[in-house]
Image (spheres, grey):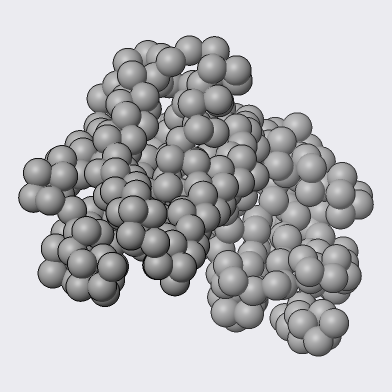
Amino acid sequence: MTHTSAERLTQLSWGSFWITTLALLCACALSVASWLNLCSQACAEGHSYRIFGLTFETVGMTVFPLITLGHLVTRFYHPLLPFIGWCLCATLGAEVVFIYLQKYKIGSWCPVCLSIAACLAVAAFPYLYSYFKVFKKSLEHPERGQIMHNIYRGLTGLGFFIIGFLIAFVGVVKENRLQAAENNIKDTIAFGNNASQIEVYIFTDWACPACRALEPNLEKIVPKVMSKARVTFVDDPIHPETLNYTPYNVSFMIHNKSNYFTLRRGLSELSKNTKEPSDQQITAIATKAGQQYKQLNYADVALANKYFTHLVSTLNVDGTPTVVVVNKNTQQGKKFSGSKKITEENILKAIQTLSKD
């Protein structure tokens, strides 16, 4: 068999080419439909699973268009054809895991997911048929080099299938939605440099006189700290009435970051006059600052309180005001308790020292 004849046999016919094209386009469209939640209730549980932290829809909407594009290119650049076939083998390997997941973990079949698997099987069939046709032809006209080449291609395809299977098997986990929500709260209430290894936690109580006295200094210190570290304000309810202010404080931290210090100042002033702030009073503070108050749902407030309680316990905070500076990589830290120790110099020096650690 000459190189020319072998090359010709590895090309897909126009009919096979368009079968694969349409099947891949359907897989892309079904991924979008799943992403838009245009699927049945049976799909709902599947949406709680992730592959290396990514939703199945995200992976599908990334991988399938790339394979489709590569497949279209094979019409003009034939050497790419085996690689696209191998990629399809990998997707089929992954689909085996996804089907197993539906059968034995979720306990229900998702029509959209099964349709995607079917589309990929249809898309891969012309490639497999082309390979077997070439392999059969090489056996009819034995040439050791060509036979070994085809065996190598077949084993490579099997290897890609196994790789796809293993990637999905290792990477697929069920998302802990409570943990994800807690992590989201941690990120959304934080200020400053999120990429920094240094974290600064500022523990205050809305009814604490020392905390109120420290507020003007915090307004000056924190902006300088935020460029070097990730900063989190923590409500530590030494006085029970602080819990009445936490929902409003957390809302401002999430929705009004750019004007947070102005709003925080308003909360501090209000706390001197009442233990039980009303929505109308909070709205007035926001309006005065040119902001809009957005009420949080109970779940978000509960998660914030849980996170604050965790920080108080983990960092051994036994009074307010307290500032804790921590290197999240080394878990080394420094604690400053009381207004006299919470100074710009001490905090910046701690950040510098811990950064070296």
Q: Is residue 92 above or below residue 76?
A: above
Front residue (pair 290, 222): 222
Q: Is residue 70 left or right of residue 197?
A: left
Q: Position of residue 67 (x, y in %)?
A: 29, 55
Q: Position of residue 194 (x, y in %)?
A: 58, 67
Q: Position of residue 87 (x, y in %)?
A: 39, 54
Residue that appears at 72% across and 60% down: 202
Q: Position of residue 121 (x, y in %)?
A: 33, 35
Front residue (pair 108, 215): 108
Q: Count up the numbered dots.
A: 0
Q: Is residue 166 left or right of residue 115?
A: right
Residue situated furthest left in the rendering = 14
Q: Is residue 314 above or below residue 351?
A: above
Task: Please say whether residue 109 is visible from this viewpoint.
Answer: yes
Task: Please say whether residue 293 is visible from this viewpoint.
Answer: no
Q: Is residue 20 left or right of residue 170?
A: left
Q: Is residue 132 above or below residue 196?
A: above
Residue that appears at 79% across and 42% down: 310
**Residue 10 sits in which quadrant?**
bottom left
Residue that appears at 43% across and 40% down: 92
| Quadrant showing the N terminus | bottom left
Residue that appears at 64% across and 65% down: 231
Front residue (pair 180, 248): 180
| Quadrant showing the C terminus | bottom right
